Image: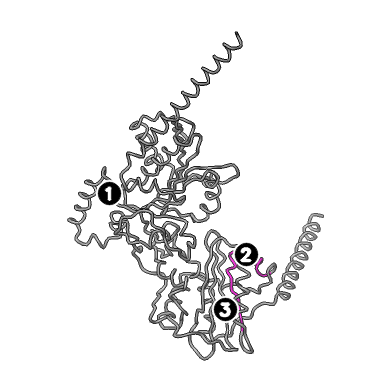
Amino acid sequence: MRRAATILLLAVLAVAVTRAELREAFGRRRAAERVIAGLFPEQAAAVADPSRRKAIWTTRRAGKTTCVLSDFVAQGFAHPHSSFVYIALTFSSAERIAWPILKDLDRKYQLGCHWQEAKLRCTLPGGSTIELLGANRPGWSERLHGIGLHFRGVAIDEAARFTIDLRHLVDDALDAALTDEDGVLYLMSTPSPIPSGLFYELTHGFDYREVFARRVPAATRECPDASRWTVHSWTTEQNPHMREKFRARLAAIMAANPNAMKDPAVLRNYFKAWVQLLGERVYAWNAERMTFPGQWRAQPDDRYVLGVDFGWNDAKALSQNVWRQDMPSLVELSSWRKRGILLSELAEHVREYQASYPVGDGGSFVVVGDPAHRDHFEEFRRAHGIPMIEAEKSDKGAQIEIWNSEAKAGHVLICEPESSPHVEEMKSLVVKVRPDGRRVEQPGLPNDCCDAHLMAFRHARHYLRGEVEPTVPDRRAVAEAERQRMREQDIAAREAREERAWNDI
């Protein structure tokens, strides 16, 4: 009898627990539904998009951050004990922008969240967490790496303004961390003054005047896997909470400045247009004057120079150039650029260039590299057997000025400029004037092919000046000279020790 009563009691408790769990699950589902129901149509379309990689391209105050955090809250309720990460440019901007939005959602829908102010971590009922990170904190990106890290959602806000290469972060860390949870990655941003980077590659091919949802971007040279993404785009005018303020502010700007539509800041912030940074170009590219007519026809006495830019955080690049005695110009046959490759892969590309342009009697093939990257330089020469000479060391600004003079005189020509990454860089690379008056290249803009070509141009300047071409050092001669230098150092050190010992007597 007692045993039957115990079994009955356990059954009643099990039913009660099951009912409590069902009520809790129903409550979480209702909370998630209320949060999503509060979005306007463009936000709701972005959340409902089944793609696992989404780019949200908007103007300022358009509601992109609210859209993404609402999605994270809804998913956090639907999938207990999930992890979500929101990344802003700085920790303070994450605290100033995203933290109040999360708290507003908590108050508005009575979610019952738990807050860890010091860590900017929000814990939802059910155990899911939303953590805010700032890209200015040391080691922030390392927190996204590692075995065992699983996220159901990651958002990178103002992605167009990140100075690091987001492609590496997405492919190396976030792709693996999101895969196991079938998670979603958001990139959201307004256009930045510098038209480059992953977000630019995904969005610049669309018409900024359109409002649209779930369009697939075309592949580009810098982003060949763009088809894995979908793009959503709207302006602040679609945000019912900011529409009237947006219209009034834009009307005031137009009234104060009749030429406001020519202002890059207005076009970026109020129309989400990608606008080339205003400023003087570093390189004086002119398609009409600098395009090589027809195809280059090789001759046995052609002299080739291949400029190699090793890079470190940037891409590695090559610039293949040629000259001959009967013409006054240096001709760039091709240029090449790629991110995230090993030195062995770069060496293989150099060998392909060498095989593609054989030389005969009177010809030569020279490989020029930047000795500032000493480890890469020596590895290329010794481990990969590529005879490389050091690029001329001189003031870069002065060399660019010389290059521009020669280019304007028609002494620098480029084959097939429409498909040249070097030309692409020259079109976008602009001058920045520092507070001390120095003119430098605008940081953040790609210049890898430009640097590779400039090294080749420096080497070829002797030809344009009528000087004798420098010779490529023989590997065995270089090794013997290095051994001789080390022997002389040892002898000098031994003599110095002996002299000190004699003086101590």
Question: Looking at the image, do the residues carrying marks 2 and 1 touch, with CB atoms under 8 Å apart?
Answer: no
Relative horizontal placement of residue 356, taking residue 255 as reference (left or right):
right
The x and y percentages for residue 216 are 41, 58
Relative horizontal placement of residue 312, taking residue 186 as reference (left or right):
right
Q: Residue furthest left?
A: 255
Which tag is nearer the camera, tag 2 or tag 3? 2
Q: Residue furthest top?
A: 1
Depth check, front residue: 234 or 159: 234
Is 134 placed above or below 194 here? above
Decide which of tag 2 and tag 1 comes sooner along the chain: 1
The x and y percentages for residue 102 are 38, 36
* Residue to which mark 2 is pinned: 343
| Tag 1 secondary structure | helix
Residue at 45% of width from left, 76% of height from top?
403
Residue at 56% of width from left, 46% of height from top?
145
Depth check, front residue: 288 or 127: 127
Quarter of the picture holding the N terminus: top right
Q: Amino acid at mark 2?
A: Leu
Q: Which mark is residue 238?
A: 1
Q: Which mark is residue 305?
A: 3
| Tag 2 secondary structure | helix
Q: Which residues are magenta?
A: 364-381
Is 329 placed above or below 39 here? below
Residue at 42% of width from left, 80% of height from top?
290
Quarter of the picture holding the C terminus: bottom right
Using the numbered discs, state the Cα–Cα distance from disc 2 to disc 1 in whole angstroms.
Answer: 49 Å
Image quadrant where residue 255 sits: bottom left
Depth check, front residue: 49 or 185: 49
Question: Looking at the image, do the residues carrying marks 2 and 3 touch, with CB atoms under 8 Å apart?
Answer: no
